[in-house]
Amino acid sequence: MIESLGKLAFDQLQKRNLIFYESDLAECGIDIRAASVCSGVFTEIFREERGLYQTKLFCFVHLSVQEFLAALHVHLTFIKSGINLLAKEEMKSKDFETRSHESSETEMYKSAVDMALESPDGHLDLFLRFLLGLSLETNKCRLRGFVAQTEETLSSFISSTTSSLKDLDLSNNDLTDSGVKLLCEGLMSPNCELKILRLSGCLITEEGCAALASALTVNSSHLKELDLSYNNPGEAGMKSLEAILKNPRVRYTLDRLSVHHKNYTSVTALCLFCPSDSCTLTVDLNTVNRFLKLSHKNKKVTHVEEEQPYPDHPDRFDLYQLLCSDGLTGRCYWEVEWGGKVYISVSYRGINRKGVNDDSWFGLNDQSWSLICSDDGYTIWHDSVKKAFIPVPSFSSSSVSGRVAVYVDCPAGTLSFYRVSSDTLIHIYTFNTKFTETLCPAFGVRDLSGVCWLSF
């Protein structure tokens, strides 16, 4: 929640907005109804007001709160992904391949100073002071405990006698085992009335699963649904979860336990399963570029030098890309094996098909979201903005290939990418947005110096 509020604060501070609409919150992944119920922090620093015609308006309780959260967002984004949000707008697709993956910390602070000096009325002065303050080593040490303090507060809240919270969704956060252990302290309280707990994609391993199993053994009177999908439970973690379901008290109350583990396909008796939202992809043959060859019953795509004899069609891409015909609804999951340099994307059907420009490249427009996989690592793009770069130094130069999982929850507005390694899913990046049209899986290749391929 704090990270989402930080993004909202930064985005709106750049626009000089002190009052925002519910649509502004949705763009930052904030559900105003859920947030006001689930987060005491939210109601302490955020305020809802009524505008003309009873339109809902929102603002932070004080401008300094917005400025601090904006600075925190810039600081944490740089620490976690190396991205300088204050850098000048990067050049468009003509320099796409030469864009730098990294920006030094000094350059970030210099960018902040430059922005503040360029402001004619000094509206970024306090933001700059907060950002420079966060750079101090003493403050960095305090921030390392920031997540832990947040989880302690949440644990205390759900165990209080005044708490009536029934549904808690912490999915796609770097909660890790330490955060789960803190949360479990609240779950064990007889005052906890949670019925639904979603911890999908929270970097939980066998240690966190063991803590949850222990907590549910102590108190399982209310919980009906527990979502642990897209974590790394391992064999030991799965055994812990099996054990709690063999406990008659837990078995009687817990209706659904969602877990993703490569060695478990469907164990109905234990309610352990890979999500039923796995989908089979079908290539839209009318969109395939003529230098992409299909094989293996149209499940493998390879870039080739020989033009393929595909018929003319207005939907066919001039770029080395294709769309699938599957319109995504609800929750959908698929995996892609790849080699070389490829785009694994989702896109609206209305994306431009003709020409070599930003309107057509996956990730360089507001119609598409893209993960670029290469031997350097993973780069995430949307609307011509590089959201993150995650290096993978363990790649072998002799065999540059891998597997990626994609999970999209259309109603919730989340799109997540994972690296599949052995029997675990390793989180790469999650988009939080609001999808306004039907999404389609999409693929492309970029590097033509070697063999580029993908299969699904």
Image (cartoon, grey):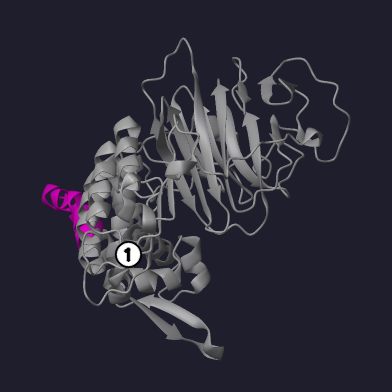
Residue 40 falls in image quadrant: bottom left
- In the displayed structure, 19 sits above or below 107; it is below
Q: How many callouts does the rendering have? A: 1
Tell me what residue is drawn at x 25 percent, y 63 percent: 154
* Screen quadrant of the N terminus: bottom left
Residue 224 falls in image quadrant: bottom left
Q: Is residue 177 magenta?
A: no
Q: Is residue 88 left or right of residue 75?
A: right
Q: Residue furthest bottom?
A: 53
Is residue 138 in view?
yes
Tell me what residue is drawn at x 73 percent, y 50 percent: 350
Q: Is residue 259 left or right of residue 182?
A: right
Tell me what residue is drawn at x 22 percent, y 59 percent: 188
- In the displayed structure, 10 sits above or below 180; it is below
x, y percent for residue 212: 27, 49
x, y percent for residue 201: 40, 45
Q: Main SS type for the magenta part?
A: helix
Q: Residue furthest left?
A: 138
* Screen quadrant of the C terminus: top right
Secondary element at tag 1? loop
Magenta segment boundaries in residue numbering: 130-152
Q: Is residue 437 left or right of residue 287?
A: left
Instruction: Specify few, some or many for label 1: CA neighbours under 10 Å numbering under 14, 14-19, or 20 or more.
Output: many
x, y percent for residue 206: 28, 37
Tell me what residue is drawn at x 41 percent, y 24 percent: 422
Residues 285 and 276: in front is 276
What amino acid does circle 1 point to? Leu
Q: Residue furthest top?
A: 398
Tag 1 residue: 124
- In the displayed structure, 110 sits above or below 6; it is above
Is residue 197 in view?
no
